[in-house]
Image (tube, rainbow, N blue to C red):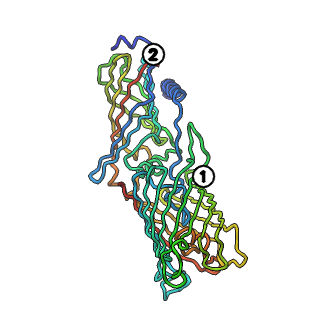
Amino acid sequence: MNNWRLVILSFFVSINSLCSQGLLDELSEEVTEQTYYTEATFKDTRIVNLQSNETTDKNVLHFVILHRFGEITDGFYNLFGIDNAQMKMSFDYGITDDISTSFARSNYQKTFEGSLKAKILKQSTGFRKMPVSITIYSACFYTNDTTGKYYNYTNLQRLSFVQQAIITKKINKNLSLALVPSLVHKNIIQAPYELHDNFILGLGGRYKVSPRVSINAEYNLRLNLPEDDRYNNGLSLGCDIETGGHVFQLHVTNSKGMFERSFLTENLGTWREGRLYFGFNLSRVFNL
Amino acid sequence: MIAQTAFTQKFMSRNVEVHFLSETPIENIEAHNNQASALFDSSTGEIVFQVPIRGFHFEKALMEEHFNENYMESEEFPKATLQGKIKSWPNVSKDVEVEGTIMIHGTEKLKTFSGTLGYDNNNWIVYSEFSVNAEDFDIKIPSIVRKQIAENIVISVNATLSPR
């Protein structure tokens, strides 16, 4: 008896909820879907060394302090490289939500750096669907070191450039991939085994292991090599940890420099021999 | 007002304003959304709302990213909905109560909402303010930001529905 009542009751309840479900379906059909741009393909503007598709948002100052320690194989005497730290300070500013600029200084070869980054295609779902994002990145580097071999360099010879197209796809909420073709031009080559124009194909990705932690990796394959090549392709592994307005990035890489010319074309470190560098980046955003 | 309800007609809005505020001594977090939509059947008193989560805009871009990515998981749960029925319709005054199911973050809750209802120039004007608790909707707030996010988040809804 009781069971029957329950069945009848639930029948009426479901009729009732069916009615307003019908109204909701009617509403869904009426409303045209908006275009939603994919957010947070990467947590930060960098994958490890490589730039990601993300730009600094409008009127936001994104201050990043990057550290790269000496070779881990230096052993205990140099505290596994910590005694020989390189650092770079980078100020990124968002001119619009899609265009940002940056100014940075690395103490590696006393390098000044200026860049412009612009999103030209944005991955989206909904009304307008776009499967990938494409961001372009251009930077110019000025070596201000005046010691040793740099002593006689003219201003023009101190310049080098990078042009990149950063093609990314957020596959699902955890996995994002990047394909980064780059051209590095050096106004002067520092050794006969270097090239003026270097083509590099960067591959990068991240996998979120929790909402606030991701594992990142990148590989930079040099496509044209000089005859007597002395450098290595860059391979880096990293971990991003996000806490509110900060992102901490920890990584291990065979790249010593923290700007494109250096980490794309001039890596002396190797994974095979364990000549690796530990690094970390701290970033903080300020809303201006 | 009651006389109008004799017509079986549906009323709709495509730009319902939804606003929410989380107030704590440390920080106030608020967001606006004017991409929500509503449909009201004046013959039955049924009213439904649909709110695209990614339509919420914040003062700080990073807040918006965290809201969508870490809290609402809006790619997985793109909409919040409310399916309700005005209590004792059509015998109502200006102050009304709506009984219905609210769905946020894929989690449904039965709830009674109080608000006001007015009729002006062929349009129904609906206003309601109510509060929700994030944890009721399975939205996890890590202990590190616990003090920055209010336990009860106040949501206000403002809609002008015109005949369809």
Q: Work out whether residue A11 can be spotted.
A: no
Q: Image point 66% across, 79% down: which residue?
A: A192
Real-space CA distance between mark 2 and mark 1, rounded to the nearest whole angstrom: 46 Å
* Residue indicated by mark 1: A169
Q: Which mark is residue A19?
A: none
Where residue A72 appears, as percent x and y from the top left, is: 54, 81
Identify the residue at horizontal 42%, vertical 41% (top origin). Answer: B56
x and y, in percent, of residue A158 in the image: 53, 73
Disc nearest the viewer among 2 and 1: 1
Q: Tell me where residue B92 sits by quadrant.
A: top left
The kind of residue on which mark 1 rests is Lys
Circle count? 2
Per the image, label 2 sits on a secondary structure element best described as loop
Disc 2 marks a residue whose amino acid type is: Gln
Q: Residue at x 44, y 62 (%)?
A: A247
Depth check: A25 or A143 in front?
A143
Q: Which residue is mark 2?
A: B9
Q: Is residue A59 visible?
A: yes
In the image, A64 versus B84, the foreground residue is A64
> Where A207 falls versus A154 (above or below)?
above
Q: In the picture provided, is A195 more to the left or to the right than B34?
A: right
Q: Considering only vertical position in the picture, is B59 above or below B4?
A: below
Quick one: SS at disc 1?
strand
Along the line of sight, the residue nearer the viewer: B5 or A49 = A49
Q: Chain of mark 1?
A: A
| Residue A162 vertical position relative to residue B117 in the rendered view, above or below | below
Q: Are marks 2 and 1 on the same chain?
A: no
Q: In the rendered view, does A185 fall on the left or right side of A57? A: right
Image marks 2 and 1: residues in contact by CB distance under 8 Å:
no
